[in-house]
Amino acid sequence: MSVFTHLVAQLGRLLEPVLAESATAAAIVLFTVLVRLALHPLSRAAFRGATPMAGCLPMLLQLPVFFVMYQAFSSAKVSGEANELLGHRLFAAPLGGRWTDALGEGGVFGAPGLVFLGLFAAIAVVAAWSAVRGRRAAAAAPPVPVALPVGAAKGAAVKGAAAKYGAKGNAGAKGNAGAKGKGNAHAKAGAKASASVAASGLPQVTAEQQAMMRKLGGVLPLLSFGTLITAAVVPLAAGLYLLTTTAWTVAERAWLQHRKERQGDAAQRSSP
């Protein structure tokens, strides 16, 4: 933690001539950007194999960074010495302060409270942007092929053939022979269709799994609003980290999606 504290303090000193008391807050934002840049290759890899859980690995790798950020602005001492970061502010609110502290100092619309309200508003805007993009992506996603076992395909085909040609079969032996031949043909066609889906290389899921994936794809974007609750109980510095990393995630995925669409359009134009 002392390494992190030293790094943020040094970045704050570099920015202090321009940003004065808010230099350390800007240093936290810059530090977050550097962390996300380091994780960008993982984010790209997760996007290429996009699933409802895409991006979880970069998020998990950020947890230690967030924990260190939380500790750095919650501990009175670092390595046995006074924590110099606790004296820094973002406008009127101390970076180590929480929303409850701001409410006690001047209420919701006091000077520190307004800083937190601005933070909450920014997080809400990013969360809404994330939710809208997530729902659009879920609606535009192509349907996943549903796996059908070959035996089930044969059974369905034979049953359909029997229902269709069974009446003719009751008229005589010739009708029964025709129904049997046509039933076999339908069974072969069903088995061939199922085998072609399996050989296509596309992911195959059951109908229940597909319905669950649709529900999960609709719920996951709403989890971004949970960041508001976290920001209300952690130090202001940790809230700035959450805002920056969440905004980066949404912007990064929007850029990757735009790049993917452009590459797809270019491939279509170049194909004969």
Image (cartoon, rainbow, N blue to C red):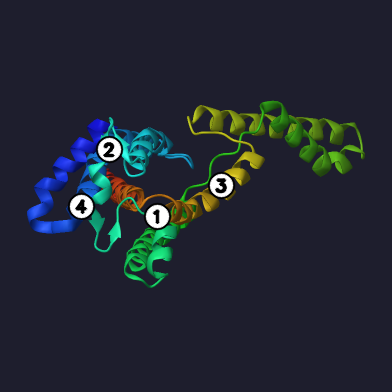
Q: Nearer the viewer, residue 188 or 223?
A: 223
Q: Which quadrant holds residue 149?
A: top right
> Which residue type does callout 2 highlight?
His
For the C terminus, the image quarter is: top left
Q: Residues within 10 Å of mark 3 (few under 14, many from 20)?
A: some
**Of pointers 4 and 2, the one earlier in the residue sequence:** 4
Left or right: residue 261 compared with residue 138? left
- Residue that appears at 41% across and 59% down: 101
Choose mark 3 or mark 1, whichever is in front.
Answer: 1
- Residue that appears at 41% across and 49% down: 234
Q: Which quadrant holds residue 164?
A: top right
Task: Examine the rendering and report whether any part of residue 124 can be seen.
Answer: yes
Circles 3 and 1: CB distance less than 8 Å? no
For the N terminus, the image quarter is: top left
- Asked if 142 appears above or below 59 in the picture, the reply is below
Q: Secondary structure at mark 3?
A: helix
Name the residue carrying label 3: 216
**Of pointers 1 and 4, the one earlier in the residue sequence:** 4
**Of pointers 4 and 3, the one earlier in the residue sequence:** 4
> Which residue type does callout 4 highlight?
Ala
Q: Residues within 10 Å of mark 1 (few under 14, many from 20)?
A: many
**Of pointers 2 and 1, the one earlier in the residue sequence:** 2
Res. 26 mark: 4
- Residue that appears at 22% across and 40% down: 34
> Which residue type does callout 1 highlight?
Arg
Choose mark 1 or mark 4, whichever is in front.
Answer: 1
Res. 40 mark: 2
**Residue 156: percent from the left, percent from the top?**
75, 36
Name the residue carrying label 1: 98
Q: Nearer the viewer, residue 147 or 84?
A: 84
- Mark 3 → mark 2, Cα distance in angstroms: 24 Å
